[in-house]
Amino acid sequence: MRHYEVTFIVDSVLSSDEIDATAKTYQDMLVNEGAEIVHNDAMGLRQLAYPIKRRTTGIYYCVEYKVESGDLISKIDLAMRRDERIMRSLVIKLDKYGVQYNEDKRAGKIGKAKRTLEKAEESKKKTSKTQVVAKTAAPKPKVKAPVAAATVTTPAPVTETLTASSEEE
């Protein structure tokens, strides 16, 4: 079986029901043509790198699927080009490395989920170490520093007055 991934941007001006209906339309089209959907990712509202149709944001969807032949690609691409709700679309054929990468990413081995897990484990280790150090260390006595006697001086009164004219100088 061949693995493909279609990514498309839906116009963000549409209502949420229309946006969901648009994504559902293309998922149903894939299933009706004999494709098996592996993963559906609704990435949500994102900022576009450049304006498309005078829009600066769009709703991103990514659908990964398996199919026997590549005949479906031309049909889905043509349908997306004709649909006014779709701003851009891209169909990619995945090789074995792309499929493995997507599987690892969904499993949490790659990306943000892995980093957050590692940070959580590190913070647990740090807090346990600080708790152990805090329990073993005895509190240090507080010593006040001696205060030096301060001398107070008063400013001398000003006896000279300045004139407003600077041309006389």
Image (cartoon, grey):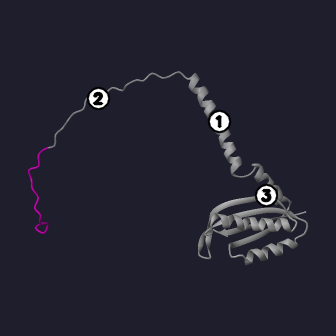
Q: For residue 124, which quarter of the picture?
A: top right
The residue drawn where x is 11% and y is 46% is: 157
Give how far apart the Cα atoms at labels 3 and 1 are: 33 Å
Element at badge 3?
strand
Q: Quadrant of the C terminus?
A: bottom left
Give percent across and percent down for residue 84.
Answer: 68, 76
Name which of mark 3 and mark 2 comes first in the sequence.
3
Amino acid at dot 3:
His
Work out whether residue 135 or residue 66 is closer to the camera in this orientation and state it: 66
Name which of mark 3 and mark 1 comes first in the sequence.
3
Work out whether residue 15 or residue 124 is closer to the camera in this orientation and state it: 15
Amino acid at dot 2:
Ala
Q: Which residue is mark 1?
A: 124
Give percent across and percent down for residue 126.
Answer: 62, 35
> Of the numbered discs in the image, which one, if any, rests on residue 28?
none
**Residue 131 drawn above or below residue 23:** above
Q: Is residue 4 left or right of residue 21?
A: right
Task: Please rate how many residues cluster around mark 1, counting C-alpha atoms within 10 Å: few if below 14, some from 14 to 19, many from 20.
Answer: few
Q: Which residue is mark 2?
A: 148
Work out whether residue 18 or residue 162 is closer to the camera in this orientation and state it: 18
- Start-end of magenta stretch: 156-169
**Residue 151 drawn above or below residue 155:** above
Give how far apart the Cα atoms at labels 2 and 1 are: 46 Å
Give percent across and percent down for residue 18.
Answer: 67, 67
Q: Is residue 149 magenta?
A: no
Q: Is residue 129 left or right of residue 62?
A: left
Q: Which residue is mark 3?
A: 39
The residue drawn where x is 81% and y is 68% is: 29
Give how far apart the Cα atoms at labels 3 and 2 are: 74 Å
Q: Main secondary structure of the magenta part?
A: loop
Query: Disc 3 or disc 1, which is closer to the eye?
Result: 3
Task: Please rate how many residues cluster around mark 2, counting C-alpha atoms within 10 Å: few if below 14, some from 14 to 19, many from 20.
Answer: few
